[in-house]
Protein backbone atom coordinates (compact mmCIF):
# COMPACT_ATOMS: atom_id res chain seq x y z
CA UNK A 1 0.00 0.00 0.00
CA UNK A 2 1.14 3.51 -0.73
CA UNK A 3 0.60 6.66 1.31
CA UNK A 4 1.18 9.62 -1.00
CA UNK A 5 2.30 12.81 0.74
CA UNK A 6 2.21 16.14 -1.01
CA UNK A 7 3.14 19.68 0.04
CA UNK A 8 4.46 20.25 3.55
CA UNK A 9 4.33 17.94 6.53
CA UNK A 10 4.85 19.72 9.80
CA UNK A 11 3.33 19.95 13.26
CA UNK A 12 0.04 21.25 11.84
CA UNK A 13 -0.43 18.36 9.36
CA UNK A 14 1.45 15.53 11.07
CA UNK A 15 -1.62 14.16 12.86
CA UNK A 16 -3.30 13.47 9.51
CA UNK A 17 -0.22 11.61 8.33
CA UNK A 18 -0.04 9.68 11.60
CA UNK A 19 -3.69 8.60 11.27
CA UNK A 20 -3.26 7.60 7.62
CA UNK A 21 -0.17 5.54 8.41
CA UNK A 22 -1.80 3.88 11.43
CA UNK A 23 -4.82 2.95 9.30
CA UNK A 24 -2.63 1.29 6.71
CA UNK A 25 -0.45 -0.53 9.27
CA UNK A 26 -3.62 -1.86 10.98
CA UNK A 27 -4.59 -3.53 7.69
CA UNK A 28 -1.25 -5.40 7.74
CA UNK A 29 -0.27 -5.04 4.09
CA UNK A 30 2.87 -6.75 2.83
CA UNK A 31 4.60 -3.38 2.51
CA UNK A 32 3.86 0.25 3.32
CA UNK A 33 5.43 2.79 0.97
CA UNK A 34 5.38 6.44 2.00
CA UNK A 35 5.74 8.35 -1.27
CA UNK A 36 7.31 11.73 -0.52
CA UNK A 37 8.05 12.65 -4.14
CA UNK A 38 5.55 15.51 -3.98
CA UNK A 39 6.60 16.68 -0.52
CA UNK A 40 8.48 19.98 -0.31
CA UNK A 41 9.15 20.12 3.44
CA UNK A 42 9.32 17.87 6.51
CA UNK A 43 9.91 19.08 10.04
CA UNK A 44 11.07 17.05 13.03
CA UNK A 45 7.50 16.05 13.95
CA UNK A 46 7.08 14.52 10.49
CA UNK A 47 10.35 12.60 10.80
CA UNK A 48 9.24 11.32 14.23
CA UNK A 49 5.94 10.26 12.66
CA UNK A 50 7.76 8.33 9.92
CA UNK A 51 10.05 6.70 12.47
CA UNK A 52 7.06 5.64 14.59
CA UNK A 53 5.34 4.21 11.49
CA UNK A 54 8.48 2.28 10.58
CA UNK A 55 8.64 0.83 14.12
CA UNK A 56 4.93 -0.12 14.00
CA UNK A 57 5.49 -1.81 10.64
CA UNK A 58 8.48 -3.71 11.99
CA UNK A 59 6.42 -4.87 15.00
CA UNK A 60 3.60 -6.06 12.68
CA UNK A 61 5.89 -7.73 10.16
CA UNK A 62 5.06 -5.14 7.49
CA UNK A 63 7.77 -3.90 5.14
CA UNK A 64 8.36 -0.14 5.15
CA UNK A 65 9.94 2.21 2.62
CA UNK A 66 10.01 5.96 1.93
CA UNK A 67 10.29 7.21 -1.64
CA UNK A 68 11.89 10.59 -2.37
CA UNK A 69 13.13 12.38 -5.47
CA UNK A 70 16.90 12.66 -5.93
CA UNK A 71 16.74 16.47 -5.86
CA UNK A 72 14.55 16.67 -2.75
CA UNK A 73 15.86 18.41 0.37
CA UNK A 74 14.35 15.46 2.25
CA UNK A 75 17.23 13.28 0.99
CA UNK A 76 19.71 15.59 2.73
CA UNK A 77 17.55 15.80 5.86
CA UNK A 78 17.37 12.00 6.17
CA UNK A 79 21.13 11.78 5.60
CA UNK A 80 21.93 14.44 8.23
CA UNK A 81 19.65 12.75 10.75
CA UNK A 82 21.11 9.33 9.96
CA UNK A 83 17.71 7.77 9.22
CA UNK A 84 18.08 6.98 5.50
CA UNK A 85 18.67 3.26 6.08
CA UNK A 86 16.11 2.90 8.86
CA UNK A 87 13.40 4.51 6.73
CA UNK A 88 14.64 2.56 3.68
CA UNK A 89 14.62 5.82 1.72
CA UNK A 90 14.69 5.08 -2.01
CA UNK A 91 14.94 7.49 -4.92
CA UNK A 92 11.85 7.53 -7.14
CA UNK A 93 10.71 9.71 -9.99
CA UNK A 94 8.39 12.54 -9.10
CA UNK A 95 4.76 11.58 -9.57
CA UNK A 96 5.26 7.81 -9.69
CA UNK A 97 3.10 5.58 -7.55
CA UNK A 98 3.07 1.83 -7.04
CA UNK A 99 -0.04 0.62 -5.25
CA UNK A 100 -3.74 -0.02 -5.44
CA UNK A 101 -4.88 2.24 -2.59
CA UNK A 102 -3.43 5.64 -1.89
CA UNK A 103 -4.26 7.76 1.10
CA UNK A 104 -3.41 11.19 -0.22
CA UNK A 105 -2.41 13.83 2.32
CA UNK A 106 -2.34 17.12 0.45
CA UNK A 107 -1.44 20.37 2.22
CA UNK A 108 -3.57 19.51 5.22
CA UNK A 109 -6.46 17.96 3.28
CA UNK A 110 -7.08 14.24 3.61
CA UNK A 111 -8.44 12.52 0.48
CA UNK A 112 -8.70 8.78 -0.17
CA UNK A 113 -8.08 7.84 -3.78
CA UNK A 114 -8.55 4.32 -5.12
CA UNK A 115 -6.64 4.92 -8.34
CA UNK A 116 -2.95 4.28 -8.91
CA UNK A 117 -2.89 7.07 -11.51
CA UNK A 118 -3.17 9.77 -8.87
CA UNK A 119 -1.06 12.45 -10.60
CA UNK A 120 -3.28 12.55 -13.68
CA UNK A 121 -6.39 12.20 -11.55
CA UNK A 122 -5.30 15.31 -9.64
CA UNK A 123 -4.61 17.23 -12.83
CA UNK A 124 -0.81 16.96 -12.60
CA UNK A 125 1.28 16.56 -15.73
Image (tube, rainbow, N blue to C red):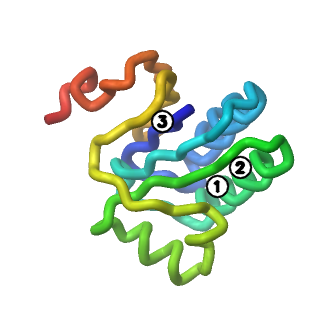
Q: Earlier in the sequence, mark 3 or mark 2?
A: 2
Query: Which residue lies at the image location 59% right of the left edge and 54% below the top edge?
Result: 11
Which disc number belongs to residue 53?
Answer: 2
Marks 1,2: beta carbons within 8 A: yes
Q: Real-space Cα distance between discs 3 and 2?
A: 15 Å
> How many residues crowd around disc 2 within 10 Å: few (fewer than 14), some, or many (20 or more)?
many
Q: Residue drawn 48% across and 22% down? A: 100
Circle 3: is it few (<14), some (14-19), or many (20+) Cα within 10 Å? Answer: many
Which image quarter: residue 20?
A: top right
Looking at the image, tell me whether mark 3 or mark 1 is earlier in sequence order: 1
Q: Which residue is mark 1?
A: 50
User: In the image, is 48 to the left or to the right of 111?
Assistant: right
Outermost residue, left direction?
Answer: 125
- Quadrant housing the C terminus: top left
Q: CA distance from mark 3 to mark 1?
A: 14 Å
Mark pair 1, 2: CA separation: 5 Å
- Secondary structure of the residue carrying tag 3 is strand
Residue 39 locus on image (x, y percent): 39, 52
Vertical placement of residue 31 versus 78, above or below: above
Label 3 belongs to which residue?
105
- In the rendered view of the protein, which quadrant contains the N terminus? top right
Residue 23 image-quadrant placement: top right
Residue at (45%, 16%) from the top-left corner? 114
Amino acid sequence: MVVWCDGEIDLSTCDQLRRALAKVVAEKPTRLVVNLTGTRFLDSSAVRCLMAAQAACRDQGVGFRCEVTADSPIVRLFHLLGVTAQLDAQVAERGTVAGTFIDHVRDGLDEAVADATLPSAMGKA
